[in-house]
Amino acid sequence: MKSIRLVMPLVFGVMVSVTGCSSSDDSEQRAALANMGAQQMYENAQRNMRNGNFGAAATTLSELDSRYPFGPLSNQVQLDLIYSYYKSGKIDETLATIDRFIRLNPNHADVDYAYYMRGLTNMESDANMFQDLMRIDRSDRDPSKSREAFEDFRRLIQQYPNSKYAADAKKRMLFIKSRLAKYEIAIARFYMRREAYVAAANRGRYVIEHFPDSDQIQPALEIMVAAYDHLGLDELKENAIKTLRLNYPDSEFIG
């Protein structure tokens, strides 16, 4: 039986359904599972997944995986467990299950799905739902998880270019590029406030060289113009202004 696995929409920070059980409920559920066979446990987990009760599904699938690690359903159980952990908001458990599946099943037909879910999970780990809801810009927060997600999606596309997840992975990589570029711009502006103009200009140039298809090229060029002006580097300043004038003629830095 195939599990319910859906491609998530292109949204930064998917709002997961946190449906985890309390410790007492979890203990009661495990006790109820004690007398079930493998097929019955799996059907129970599938029913919980269909009903959106991913916390209960994860508990059942984890117990099933522990009890029958080499059963005929073992690979499918692990794939369903990845999805259930992800939908329950259990980031560490999701990543650990993904890494174990990839390590033990490098040639499995669904290993591309595992890489895709790894990218989604790392994107989720980088998100801050409260800040997103309140429209608080925290571009300066550590982007290490976004970098990991970018690498996950890059590996998926390189190794499985015909995967049904490849197209969405490419879109997410563009989104992550924008996230990483915004981080560089936030740091460049910090350097400008500290009057560290060389460092600020270098950050702007880094954005142009490494994220040329992001939406942060204009602020990168404007930072470079301002930094070079403070440094008295007129030739570099004029070169940056020329590029601004060509691509962003409405920029206030041109005049």
Image: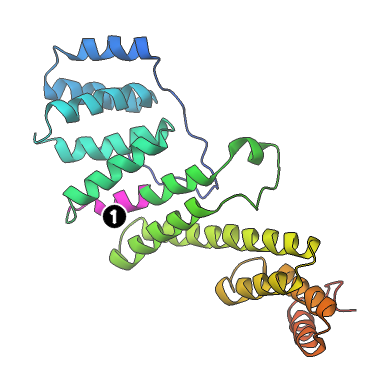
Q: Residues within 10 Å of mark 1 (few under 14, many from 20)?
A: many
- Name the outermost residue toward the right: 255
Q: Residue at x 37, y 27 (%)?
A: 54
**Mark 1 element type:** helix
User: Residue 164 versus residue 212: which sits nearer the camera?
Assistant: 212
Instruction: Write down the residue under mark 1.
Output: 112
Which colour assignment does the render follow?
A: rainbow
Name the residue located 37 percent from the left edge and 60 percent from the top edge: 166
Name the magenta segment's main secondary structure: helix
- Magenta-highlighted residues: 108-117
Q: Is residue 146 above or below residue 208?
A: above
68 falls in the magenta region: no
Q: Position of residue 116 (x, y in %)?
A: 36, 52
- Residue at image x 26%, y 25%? 45
Residue 2 can be seen in this image: no
Viewer-proximal residue among 238 and 89:
238
Can you tell which quarter of the image residue 179 is in? bottom right
In which quadrant will I find the N terminus?
top left
- Residue 125 appears anywhere in the view: yes
Please state the horizontal and vertical placement of residue 169, each as a whole percent of the image.
42, 58
Q: Position of residue 232 (x, y in %)?
A: 84, 83
Q: Amino acid at mark 1?
A: Asp
